[in-house]
Structures are given as C-alpha cells and as structure tokens.
Image (tube, rainbow, N blue to C red):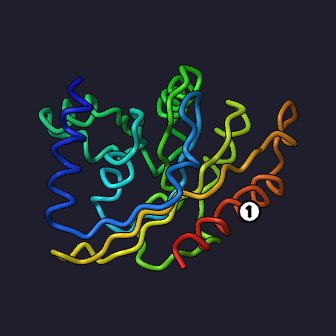
C-alpha cells in the first residue's frame, strides 16, 4: 500500500513537472518475474521507470543510499536493497534472487552508475547472471531527457529478451559478454 501511494504521488508530480512520453508498456509482463534493464542518466531514473508500471518493482541501489536511517527505511519500503558496487556482494545477490524467485520485477542499471552517454561495452554482467540463474526474461528500457522543468522525458520499454538457450549450464565469460551485448544493443535502440 505504501509503495502504491508513493508511486501515485510521484507520478502526479512527474506529470506536472515534465512532459512524459511512455511507449512499450505492453512489453511488461503482467505477472511473473523479470529483469528491467535500463540506461541510467539521472538520480530520478528508478522512480520514472517504476511509477508508471502497474506492478511493484524491486531495485538494486548503491549502498551509500542506505547510510541515513530514514532514507534506508524509505528505500527499503520502496523495494530497494543495497549493493556494494566495489566488490562481489553476496547479500545483494541473494536479495536479487529472492525478489526474482518470488515473482517480482527487478530494476537493474547494468552500467552500475549514471552515464549521460550509453556505452554498451561498460555494462556489468549481473543482468545476464541473474536472468539465467533465475530463468527470467529481460525487458530492455531506454530513458531519454534532461530532467529540466517542463522538458520531455521519454520512457521506452522494449520486447522481452529470452535467455532460455543459456539455462541449465554454467555461463562462460564469453556467454555473459554475448548476452550483455544483445541486451545493451536493444537498450541503445530504445535510447536512440
């Protein structure tokens, strides 16, 4: 309930402040787990991706956002969990897998940080690993805009990418690169 109320308030505020254009919502599964993989241009991106989706989402968020107890409580209530970007973080891995196994949608910014220009070669392999391990589709998403008041923000969701051919085996570094290139190429089309 808290999540839906906050999303409603944020969606109203976003529509007042920006011109929002959304396309491809039909590509988002109505049920079942999936990963939403997007470019990351602004700190508002997680909210923009989530508030216009009918389902509750979970988020991987940098651990620095959880140092303040009030912020930590708020972000946790909104489905975010911390990730230490500087190392292999097993707690965040378990949280991501738990979210996916429970049928949630998980938002991941595969570049790990905000970047104004999309560099498909800078994507980390987490999306590939989670997608194959949890056996869930990946929905590419593209965000475009400046977040200046009254500017246009484009939110585009692409068709699901199935990773089924990789299920059941141990992923090699080459396969992870192959998966991430395919996903990020789709994100690039949505941003372009």
Q: Residues within 10 Å of mark 1 (few under 14, many from 20)?
A: some
Which residue is painted at 57% across and 75% down in the image?
119
Q: Quarter of the image for the C terminus: give it.
A: bottom right
Q: Nearer the viewer, residue 182 or 12?
A: 12
Q: Nearer the viewer, residue 93 or 120?
A: 120
Residue 126 in the figure: left or right of residue 108: right
Which residue is painted at 26% across and 32% down in the image?
4
Residue 32 in the figure: left or right of residue 176: left
Which residue is under mark 1?
182
Percent x, y for residue 108? 49, 49
Which residue is painted at 28% across and 47% down in the image?
64
Residue 140 in the figure: left or right of residue 132: left
| Image vertical order of residue 66 relative to residue 178, above or below | above
Percent x, y for residue 28? 55, 44
Which residue is painted at 47% across and 57% down in the image?
112
Toward the top, the furthest residue is 102
Give SS at disc 1. helix
Percent x, y for residue 169? 87, 34
> How many badges with numbers are in the image?
1
Q: Quarter of the image for the N terminus: give it.
A: top left
When asked about the image quadrant of residue 76, the answer is: top left
| Image vertical order of residue 23 relative to residue 49, above or below | below
């Amino acid at each position: 309930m808290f999540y839906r109320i906050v999303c409603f308030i944020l969606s109203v505020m976003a529509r007042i402040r920006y011109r929002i254009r959304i396309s491809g919502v039909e590509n988002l599964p109505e049920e079942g787990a999936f990963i939403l993989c997007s470019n990351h241009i602004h700190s508002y991106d997680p909210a923009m991706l989530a508030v216009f989706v009918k389902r509750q989402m979970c988020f991987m968020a940098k651990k620095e956002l959880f140092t303040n107890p009030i912020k930590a409580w708020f972000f946790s209530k909104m489905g975010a969990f911390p990730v230490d970007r500087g190392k292999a973080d097993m707690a965040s891995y378990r949280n991501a897998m738990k979210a996916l196994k429970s049928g949630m949608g998980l938002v991941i910014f595969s570049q790990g940080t905000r970047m104004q220009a999309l560099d498909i070669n800078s994507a980390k392999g987490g999306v590939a690993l989670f997608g194959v391990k949890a056996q869930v589709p990946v929905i590419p998403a593209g965000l475009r805009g400046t977040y200046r008041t009254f500017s246009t923000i484009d939110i585009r969701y692409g068709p699901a990418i199935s990773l089924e051919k990789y299920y059941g085996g141990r992923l090699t570094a080459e396969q992870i690169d192959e998966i991430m290139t395919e996903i990020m190429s789709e994100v690039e089309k949505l941003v372009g």
